[in-house]
Amino acid sequence: MNRISTTSNEEEQLLARQCAAQERKAQSQFYQLYAGRLFTVCLRFMPSRAEAEDIFHDGMLIIFERLKQFTWQGNGSLLKWACQVMRNECLQKLRKTSRFRMISLDESLEEEGTLGSEIEAHMASLHDDSIETSLVQKIPMAKILQLISTMPDGYRIVLNLVLFDGLSHREAAKLMGINEKSSSSQYARAKRFLAQKIKQIISNEQNE
Amino acid sequence: MNEQNNPQWLDTLRNDVNHYESLPPTSEWTHLEASLDAQGTVPKKALWTIQSHWLRIVGSGAIAALLVLGFLLIYPASEGPAPIVQLPTEVSTAELIEPSTLLLVDSVSVNLSIRTNTVAQMMPSTETLTLAPLGEVTQITLLDEIPFVATEQTTIQPTKTTQVVVDSLLMLKRKRQREYLEQLEMENERIRVYNEQLEQSVSHLANKRFTIGLMADAGLMNQSNSVSGSTNQMMSLAVSDMNYESPTNEAKGLKLYNANNYAFIAQPSYSYHHKYPLNLGLSFAINVAPRLAFVTGLVYTKLSADVTDEIDHRTFGQTVHYLSIPIAIQWSLIEQRYYNIYLSAGTTVGRSIDAQIDEQSFSVHGVQTSFNTSLGAQYFLLPHWSIFTEVGYAKFYDDDKRIETYRDTHSTEITFSFGFRWHL
């Protein structure tokens, strides 16, 4: 069910103004409308549900605090802005816990040539990422999110930024503090990793 | 939008994930409300907030007072030799006798050695002695500094009125003579100490100064003698022997020496090329109220200059090291979670901890103070640490005028500083 689409432009603007004025009723309404989407952001960025819950709480407080700085830019801009704030909080938290180092490690392996082009090609042939769309849609979304959360930090972050948030590799690389090429290669591997895991789930379900 | 060539299943997955709503824990809104209440409940926190602010303000003031007091006690001005380029401060220019006055000393001494046919009268109010030898009238004004010598040999044909005047004059002369000799002895002692310091500190410069002094002494003595001679001729008087010849001459020599030094100061023989000051410091900030912080720290300053002796064109170094405590109040103009932009105003109190001229140490007296204002920005890297940058204006006040530093030639300064700050 999509509750958000039922909000009109005027209602969205009014809601933003009232929340900025720290009106508790409006804040409650904001929570009812957007908490689900915002919590999904946390779940897909953070490696565990417990960490996602923590960051969701802190992120919501920051969103309410910063709503006075929000400028309405069309329908849906409030949710988009809130998702960005939540995403930044997740990245900030990951940065503090040094999770970005995983990416640096991968980068160094790459630079050392341990994953040469021949091996890459071989791996790609072994892990074909083509999957039947209808089969993917049968997998519960909670399971997909759980699967994403189990991905290595580097893969998970780049997949979130590039695939789900729609950032370019340049933008994602800037946020992660790595170069654009690394972001691109990380993303390719993340996709293969995800495809492999989804295939495993499908295979297991078919066997059952 | 991202331009990735994703397989269809991935695009579908993206769409599904982006529209999926995960339910947060059921009690989350309750917790959130509690946190929002804690953030926004002003009445409950107000009293403690005010108390806390006052405590912090009083605490900050106490810390600042202790820092300044401790600083001044720990680093008192050491009693080392004075800098060679100036006289000791206890000899003020007011105590020095200029060469012109010294000439008068001699001429008066001569004029007082009158033997015959002279009528002397003293006007008590103006202290003017009128001498009228053989119908000529010459007037000499007696200055306060003039010593009276050789009075016993003065012979004046007494009359009833003049005898009284002369007696009074003699008494006054004796009194002034005693005072003058006492003063000369004290000054003699000061100059002896000063000369010792000069010789100890920089021998070659001291020698040079001494040589100059002697040369100037000789010149003045000659000049003095010639004036005395002309006075004798004009007034047809003879120079008598002086009872106080030895101390007076010694004192005269010293006086001349001092006067010479005085002239030396009046026409500086050193030129300075000052280098930019180097400042290194630690900065601490204590938040005393919303948007208001008390800032202090410790700053080391190095003031260097190349000094050129204009007589022999020799260049040597001068370095003064200061340790200062800045005290300022910082007001945040813009305050965000990770950064703020602020205005700051305050003062800095500093003392010299070491100074050297031509590799010889000397002590710099007094306290250097400054008034500072600045506009700055700081970014919080860690919970208690920020990196800051400031553009400021500083006005310096230096109470030791014996040496010249960058602060004397640039008493106002536009400063640019940056660094790390620890927040309490």
Image (cartoon, grey):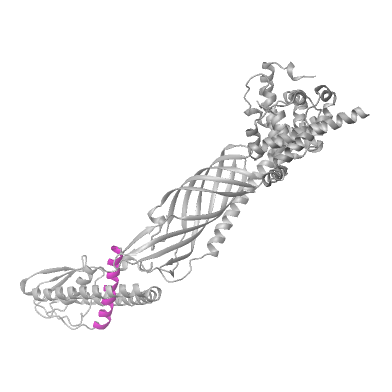
Residue A57, horizontal then vertical, whole percent:
76, 34
Q: Which residues are magenta?
A: B245-267
Q: Nearer the viewer, residue A74 or B350?
A: A74
Residue A80, horizontal then vertical, whole percent:
68, 25
On whether residue B254 falls in the magenta region, the answer is: yes
Image point (41%, 64%), residue name: B318
Residue B154, horizontal then vertical, whole percent:
17, 80
Would you place residue A26 above or below residue B231 in this image? above
Would you place residue A68 above or below residue B309 in this image? above
Left or right of B66? Residue A49 is right
Q: Nearer the viewer, residue A194 or A13?
A: A194
Magenta highlight: main SS: helix
Residue A51 in view of the camera: yes
Q: Nearer the viewer, residue B14 or B179?
A: B14
Would you place residue A9 above or below residue B273 in this image? above
Residue lying furthest left in this view? Answer: B135
Residue B34 in view of the camera: no
Image point (82%, 25%), residue name: A136
